[in-house]
Image (cartoon, rainbow, N blue to C red):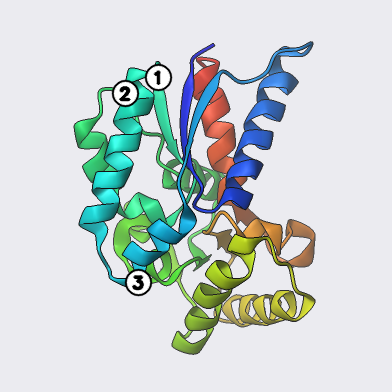
Amino acid sequence: MKTLGLIGGISWVSTADYYRLINEGINEKLGGLNFSRCIIHSFNYADIKKNNDANDWDTTFRMLSEAALHLESSGAEAIILCANTMHLIADRLQAVLHVPLIHIATPTVAAIEKAGMKKVALLGTKFTMEQDFFKSKLTEKGITTIIPEEGDRAFIHQTIFEELGRGLIREATRQRYLSIIGQLIREGAEGIILGCTEIPLLIKAADVPVPVFDTTLLHANAAVAFSLNES
């Protein structure tokens, strides 16, 4: 079994889900008392949020690269960024590492391709929805990505940080998300990407009438496959 290096705290609630899902995935494969060999570096979310607000990705890169290199020197054989938004700097980070960084978009795109879909909607922070670091991976495979309108994007972004990232689950927020998703389906979305690791805390596949792609689960499964030499 290979050792995984998880960079989390962005937020702690979704990092806890990563830890659970990876350990459950290993145990499902191996049974008994077999669980993941992993090392976790957990950030203070406020430090990351401050950089996000200032659009200071150079400081975030320095913080994450220091953490990733520390994990690598401690024996991690792959790095997992436990947050979609942090993949904005994933390519820069991979360039300084000597071990692979398992990109969250890779298993997501593979699942969408397997489902035969050509048009999907992407929910996440404004960085994930508006910038190309995630959408470009879909475009490369001929998959069209649509995103909510500006007011809805602002609502999603705000609630990710002010509610979901704090572990606050509110029914009014869930209903607004479902309304946004309904509009995206009317615009032709064949599937919905939950492109923020906190959104699956609020929205479940059973809530949505089209297939849902939970990036947290897909990413965790990819980490399990790497750890067990299945990928």
Q: Is residue 143 visible?
A: no
Q: Residues within 10 Å of mark 2 (few under 14, many from 20)?
A: some
Q: How far is disc 1 from disc 3 in space, using C-alphas?
A: 32 Å
Q: Which residue is mark 1?
A: 77
Rendered image: mark on residue 53:
3
Q: In the figure, 157 relative to 103: above or below?
A: below
Q: In the figure, 111 relative to 34: above or below?
A: below
| Between discs 1 and 2, the one toward the N terminus | 1
Q: Label 2 near label 1: C-beta < 8 Å?
A: yes
Q: How far is disc 1 from disc 2 in space, using C-alphas?
A: 6 Å
Q: Label 2 near label 3: C-beta < 8 Å?
A: no
The structure residue drawn at horizontal position 46% and vertical position 48%, both measured from the top left corner, is: 109
Badge 3 element:
helix
Q: Amino acid at mark 3?
A: Asp
Badge 2 element:
loop
The structure residue drawn at horizontal position 40% and vertical position 41%, both measured from the top left corner, is: 103
Q: How far is disc 3 from disc 2 in space, using C-alphas?
A: 30 Å
Would you say 170 lies left or right of 89 here? right
Q: Which quarter of the picture shows residue 36?
A: top right
Question: Picture coordinates of residue 136 (x, y %)?
Answer: 32, 57
The one nearer the camera, 116 or 13, is 13
**Mark 3, mark 2: which one is toward the viewer?**
3
Q: Amino acid at mark 1?
A: Glu
Rendered image: mark on residue 60:
none
Question: Picture coordinates of residue 140 (x, y %)?
Answer: 32, 52
Question: Picture coordinates of residue 92 (x, y %)?
Answer: 22, 44
**Mark 1, mark 3: which one is toward the viewer?**
3
Q: Which residue is mark 2?
A: 99
| Between discs 1 and 3, the one toward the N terminus | 3
| Between discs 3 and 2, the one toward the N terminus | 3
Would you say 230 lies left or right of 87 here? right
